[in-house]
Image (tube, rainbow, N blue to C red):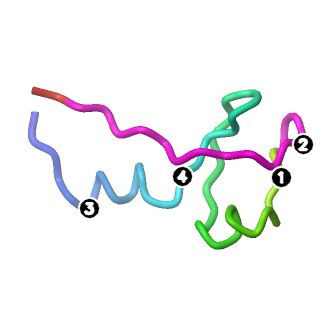
Amino acid sequence: MVKFPEAVARIHHNVFVCKKCKTKMRTYMSKILLKKIKCRKCGAKVFRPIKAKQTK
């Protein structure tokens, strides 16, 4: 399967996952670093970037 850069950027760019409840959110990195964003589901302010799946 061919990966298009536009599709990969749309799926993985500015997407973060809550470390507590694993909910995905789309926002800017600066807001995550300043702790201005909280999780919609659990209210936590701790996020990690989404992991891109590696294919061989």
How far is mark 3 from mark 1, CA to CA? 28 Å
Disc 2 or 4, which lies upstream in sequence?
A: 4
Q: Which residues are magenta?
A: 40-54
Tell me: residue 46, above or below residue 55: below
Question: Is mark 3 in CB contact (under 8 Å) with mark 1?
Answer: no
- The question of residue 53 being in magenta is answered with yes
- Identify the secondary structure beneath mark 4: strand
- Identify the secondary structure beneath mark 2: loop
How far is mark 1 from mark 2, CA to CA? 5 Å
Disc 3 or 1, which lies upstream in sequence?
A: 3
Question: Is mark 1 in CB contact (under 8 Å) with mark 2?
Answer: yes
Q: Position of residue 9 (x, y in %)?
A: 34, 59
**Total number of numbered labels?**
4
Q: Quadrant of the N terminus?
A: top left
- Residue 45 located left or right of residue 2: right
Q: Main secondary structure of the magenta part?
A: loop
Q: In the rendered image, which residue does mark 3 sit on?
A: 6
Disc 1 or 2, which lies upstream in sequence?
A: 1
Q: Position of residue 21 (x, y in %)?
A: 75, 27
Hey, what amino acid is under mark 3? Answer: Glu
Tell me: residue 4, above or below residue 35: above
- Identify the secondary structure beneath mark 1: loop
Hey, what amino acid is under mark 1? Answer: Lys
* Label disc, if present, on residue 43 of the rendered structure: 2
Hey, what amino acid is under mark 4? Answer: Val
Q: Tell us which disc is closer to us: 3 or 1.
A: 1
How far is mark 4 from mark 3, CA to CA? 15 Å
Give the image quarter of residue 22: top right
Q: In the rendered image, which residue does mark 4 sit on?
A: 15
- Residue 33 located left or right of residue 2: right
Q: In the rendered image, which residue does mark 1 sit on?
A: 38
